[in-house]
Image: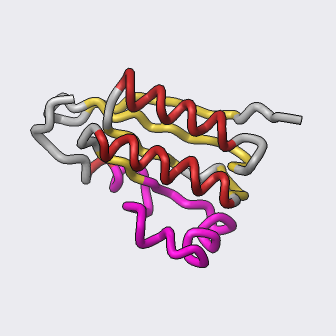
Amino acid sequence: MEKAIDMEQTTHITQDGTTVIILQPMGRLDITTAWQFRLKLQECIAKLSRHVVVNLGQVNFIDSSGLTSLVAGMRDADKVRGSFRICNVHPEAKLVFEVTMMDSVFEIFETELEALEGIPRGVAS
């Protein structure tokens, strides 16, 4: 059975007016929820902003399909010369990033604020 993923979405405007979408999925990012998350990322990048921060503070489990959805989001953002950042990785999920060496693929920040501070300035969104 497919499960709905709980997710918070907020919009942040940087000092120079760049729009950044912050997504905070909750619970498990796995085979039952990853496709929805993937669609949400696609939609945000296509329609709202090419700059996305994914806050994983509430995701206590992530599997390969969860990682795949994140990689796909990063690729979507790259295609439109945007940015894709991950922050606040839950300790339980951090191990998955380290074991798969995905921690070197993604831009991962400790906090949401740090992730937002690094958004390229002067890039019209």
Q: Residue at x 81, y 35 (%)?
A: 3
Q: Residue furthest right?
A: 1
Q: Is residue 38 magenta?
A: no
Q: Point out residue 118 in the picture as x, y percentages from the top left corner.
A: 25, 53
For residue 12, which quarter of the picture? top left
Q: Residue at x 30, y 42 (%)?
A: 79
Q: Point out residue 69 in the picture as x, y percentages from the top left corner.
A: 57, 47
**Quadrant of image for the C terminus:** top left
Q: Is residue 64 above or below residue 39?
A: below
Q: Is residue 73 above or below residue 109?
A: above
Q: Point out residue 123 in the picture as x, y percentages from the top left corner.
A: 14, 37
Q: Residue at x 35, y 42 (%)?
A: 77
Which contiguous range is marked in magenta?
86-115
**Quadrant of image for the N terminus:** top right
Horizontally, residue 97 falls left or right of residue 87, namely right
Q: Residue at x 49, y 47 (%)?
A: 72
Inspect this view and state whether residue 109 appears.
Answer: no
Q: Point out residue 65 in the picture as x, y percentages from the top left corner.
A: 66, 53
For residue 67, which quarter of the picture? bottom right
Q: Is residue 69 above or below residue 7?
A: below
Horizontally, residue 104 falls left or right of residue 24, namely left
Q: Is residue 92 magenta?
A: yes
Q: Is residue 67 above or below residue 102?
A: above
